[in-house]
Amino acid sequence: MQWRSRPVVPISDTHGFTSAAHFAKEDTDLRFPGILRQAHTRDRDGMIRTDWTREEIAELFDLPFTELLFRAATVHREHHRPDEVQLCTLLSIKTGGCPEDCGYCSQSAHADSGVEATKLMDVRQVLQSAAQAKDAGSQRFCMGAAWRNPKDRDMPKIVEIVKGVRDMGMETCMTLGMLTPAQAEQLAEAGLDYYNHNVDTGPEYYDRVITTRKYEDRLTTLENVRQAGINVCSGGIVGMGETREDRVGFVHTLATLERHPESVPVNALVPVKGTPLGDMLADTPMAKIDDIEFVRTVAAARIAMPMSMVRLSAGRESMSDATQALCFMAGANSIFTGEKLLTAPNAGDDSDAALFARLGLKAMEGEEPLRAASGRAVGGCSGGCATKEAQAELT
Ligand code: SF4
């Protein structure tokens, strides 16, 4: 076998990290001529693309795994520091008893998961938790309430919480269910940085997971949030029995929003006993998303939404260090810290510290790229982004 030699001239990207991608691209395109356009994340005017076709996203998923990973890593380091991961803390401020029937969620009143319904926490309690999260190094505090939508009578307390957490110098994110334009405005005026509202899956699979609302309802709330000037956090859950085509649809939906979400949580379902999906999938091979397919989803999201923060959320605590490392390589650059995600277990600070030490990663301190580009000050979460059992809980 003959190896073609070519001069190797390392190129440093904007973060000072050497990238092999620039000089390898020509060879790659020769090997995969039909997928050249997939590397194009910007249009002719240099703007981030939002005109992805489903076929293009599907072709990304279909790439040879190492090629997909390489392309995603290349796109990632063009927009983000590859050695930094954002740390967020998530608190459930109102747990259980939700009237929605999300099939993955332990907090749904339709589920028999043993999660007890609570009232909205006191403002003081929430602020105490935020202070602890800040002391532990989190820059962002995400708060989730198990509601179909907030009632107007809840809003003054919610506003007080947002203002209180912001006054502590932390970024704020909330996930409260569907919002009216007026409620989104109220939250924006309070200074909320991010609102989480996941599309959950692709449009065709949505009614297999949730029947009490429609896909369009989710998109309407996302639009209300965007119109109010709040940063958007929206992602989904894989491993719910959906097909790859549904995962393509999930990434395509987000990548073709008029403006990409600033945060994109990608969750792996961990079935919870007593929930419809948990009971249906727990004892089947489909119950756990294949690790490689999960990494493919992260990589496709990274390429299609190059400036967004891609968050590893639910299911991370059951992933091996090697799988998490592949996810970081594929462009994931945000995680939830702490022992708990809403009602679900999380990896825990000690195990994250050990993982970061093994991988040479550090906590992100600067501004998120999309947020910085928008000119808004502090920036928020991804909140609700979910957990494993609860992955869902994030509305
Ligand atoms: S995911 Fe959110 S909306 Fe759905 S049941 Fe759980 S708390 Fe309610």
Image (cartoon, rainbow, N blue to C red):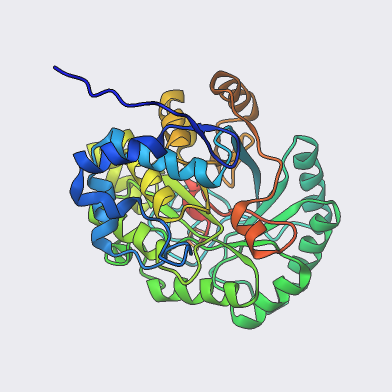
244 with respect to 13 (left or right): left
Could you tell me residue 341's position as x and y percent? 58, 43
Query: In this view of the protein, which residue sits in the foreground, 207 or 118?
Result: 207
Picture mark count = 0
Q: Residue at x 66, y 39 (%)?
A: 364
- Give the percent coordinates (x, y) of residue 198: 48, 60
Q: Above or below — where is 81 with respect to 203?
A: above
Determine the image quadrant of residue 295. top left
Q: On the picture, is 378 further left or further right than 368? A: right
Can you give x and y, in whole percent of width and height, for residue 130 in the image? 77, 47
Q: Visible in this render: residue 290?
A: no
Q: Residue at x 22, y 46 (%)?
A: 62
**To which quarter of the image does residue 254 belong?**
bottom left
Residue drawn at x 28%, y 62% is 205
Q: Residue furthest bottom?
A: 182
Residue at far left of view = 1
Left or right relative to 99: residue 292: left
Along the viewing direction, whichever of 26 and 220 lies nearer the viewer: 26
Q: Position of residue 271 (x, y in %)?
A: 38, 43
- Foreground pick, 97 / 324: 324
The answer to whether residue 96 is left or right of residue 207 is right
- Residue at x-position 52% and y-position 63%: 197
Residue 226 in sight here: yes
Residue lying furthest front in this view?
Answer: 7
Report the quarter where the N terminus lies.
top left
